[in-house]
Image (cartoon, rainbow, N blue to C red):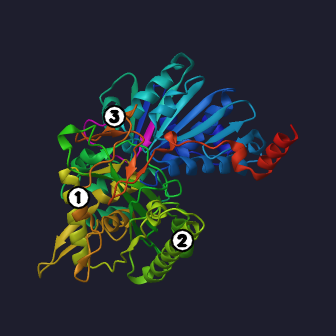
Amino acid sequence: MNLATFAERVLRRPLWPHQLEAAATSKFVTTIAAARRTGKTVLAETLAIHTAFANAGSEVIVLSATLDSARRLTESIGATLNASKLTRGAVVADFSTRVKLANGSEIISLPSSPKQVRGLGAGVLLTILDEAGFQGQEMFVAAHYTALDHRQEGSRILMIGTPWGGAEHFFRRAYEAGVNGDPDHASYRWTHEVNPLLDHAYLERQRDRVSPAEYAAEVLGEWSDAAGSLFGRELLERATADYDMPTLATLHGPAQPMLGCDWGALFDRSAAVAIGRLPVARLNPDRRGRPTFGVAAVEVWPQGTRLADVVSDVLASPTPWALVSPEETGVGAGPSQDLLAHLRRRSADAYDQAVDRYRDTESEPWEWMRGLAHPPIPNPVSTTAAKKATAYGFLLSLLEQEPAVLPRHPDLLRQLAGLRFEQGERGMTRIEADSPGTHDDVADALMLATAPFSRGRTRALPARRLSRAEIPDARVLEPSDTVTTGGGLVLPRSPFWQSVNGGELTMPVALQPKAEPEDRNPVLTRAREYLTTRS
């Protein structure tokens, strides 16, 4: 059954002509530069499902820019299969990143990690790079050679996404190779016009309402260098590296990072960004004495998520924060108060527990205080135009001086590239997104996390002072795998994280000692103790 028939009769989700045209090519590498709402995700999911069904025992790999994107894609594929009576029974396993079919085929959705991709290859007939412009060069190299193993059986690579990346980025180079007639490449550009359901007249009028860079990428599916933006794409590329970033739920101590929270009500989403210190002086001898900071976690909640649920998710993180900066203007007043109140209560409870432990022992006071994290400094922020200008100006300075590193996170990079500054008649500077229809929630959370704000006459642990801190980098193990920013800064692919205001160090998850499964199961633990005593 061909793809068009499969999509229409089995999945009950017919494809549009432009989607079928791109899917029908026999070229090894297919590149699609697509505007928003043009069917990128639908094509990727349909092609993945059809390939897995038509080739028993095969593998389809879908590589996403972030772990959250990979999980959402897996959930969407599972929902599509379960929605059809003809495919519902074919799914025998549905995990967070893997869907296994009854015919032995698997659809594996992974975040951007070359190490994970290199371990695959047997039976891989289709490799999809979703939002390819936000993935690093090593991802394409790993995906390319994985797909090559079965080239004679018809394996192929599909790279798809909104145009992003400089002239040397593999996504842009692959697109241009197809345009120039390379026999192994096919390239397509999808503008807003390919979607018959969009209001094309309205989008044409948007040409005069938003920046040329945004209109080119999001509406026309064209690359742009985003001239005139506060954070130019060249600057962002210099500061970006493809390192493994934990989620808010898996980020933990003893290192104490800073946290910024931006609350979303109707249009905007809620977002949280954590900033920690990267002890990378040994890998960059020319930078010794200059602390380096990095984005340690990015969390974005779906639009419409209850603010109480966002507060609960933030509190569920096991991280001992050095400083917490929630935005308390407007709808943020309530959740900011709740968040800070719970964090204060948590610190007080931890202190009381430590005092109780001290009373039960003969140890000296400093021995139990040594392992007690400092309570987070509360830094609620009522944002104004002046404060935003100060904060984004400081963030710009951090990126230009290269003591800050960004992950290749699509939402974060898009929003930073879309920020514009405007000088008012009275000399006031306003920093806003390109247009009222553009999100700036993740960028604002990053801005809040840097905390360059005054509280009265004293500064509450601002990153400006920390950027010149004399606290040395903690000594860490020599990494086996490193990545490099566009500006040449070397860091581990799985970084150690250090407190922004101290020497506490959190190891990467891969290096942490793992407890035996029985230790996490009280029933098995009691059974093991019983058998031990009986023997």
Q: Residue 359 placed where, x, y %?
A: 57, 70
Task: Based on the picture, tell me whether residue 364 belongs to the magenta stretch.
Answer: no
Spatial CA span between label 1 and label 2: 32 Å
Q: Report the residue that reaches farthest toward the front.
A: 362
Mark 3 or 1 closer to N-term? 3
Q: For the residue labelled by badge 3, is the local secondary structure a helix, a strand or a loop?
A: helix
Q: What secondary structure do most residues of the magenta stretch adopt?
A: loop
Q: For the residue labelled by badge 1, is the local secondary structure a helix, a strand or a loop?
A: loop
Q: Which residue is mark 2?
A: 355
Query: Looking at the picture, does residue 462 appear above or below residue 64?
Result: below
The amino acid type found where label 3 is placed reads Phe
What residue lies at 35% left-to-right and 48% top-to-bottom?
221
Mark closer to the observer (3, 2): 2
In the image, taking residue 244 as reference, residue 293 lies left or right, namely left
In the image, taking residue 227 as reference, residue 270 lies left or right, namely right
Q: Check disc 3: other Cα within 10 Å, few if <14, some if 14-19, many if 20+.
A: many
Q: Report the residue that reaches farthest toward the top.
A: 152
Which circle marks residue 170 in the picture?
A: 3
Q: Which residue is mark 1?
A: 469
Q: Residue 11 placed where, x, y %?
A: 67, 45
Name the residue nearer the viewer: 297 or 10.
Answer: 297
Spatial CA span between label 3 and label 1: 38 Å
Q: Residue 65 placed where, x, y %?
A: 44, 45
The amino acid type found where label 2 is placed reads Val
Q: Check disc 2: other Cα within 10 Å, few if <14, some if 14-19, many if 20+.
A: some
Which circle marks residue 255 in the picture?
A: none
Mark 3 or 2 closer to N-term? 3
Mark closer to the observer (3, 1): 1
| Segment colored magenta | 159-169
Mark closer to the observer (1, 2): 2
Q: Is residue 230 visible?
A: no
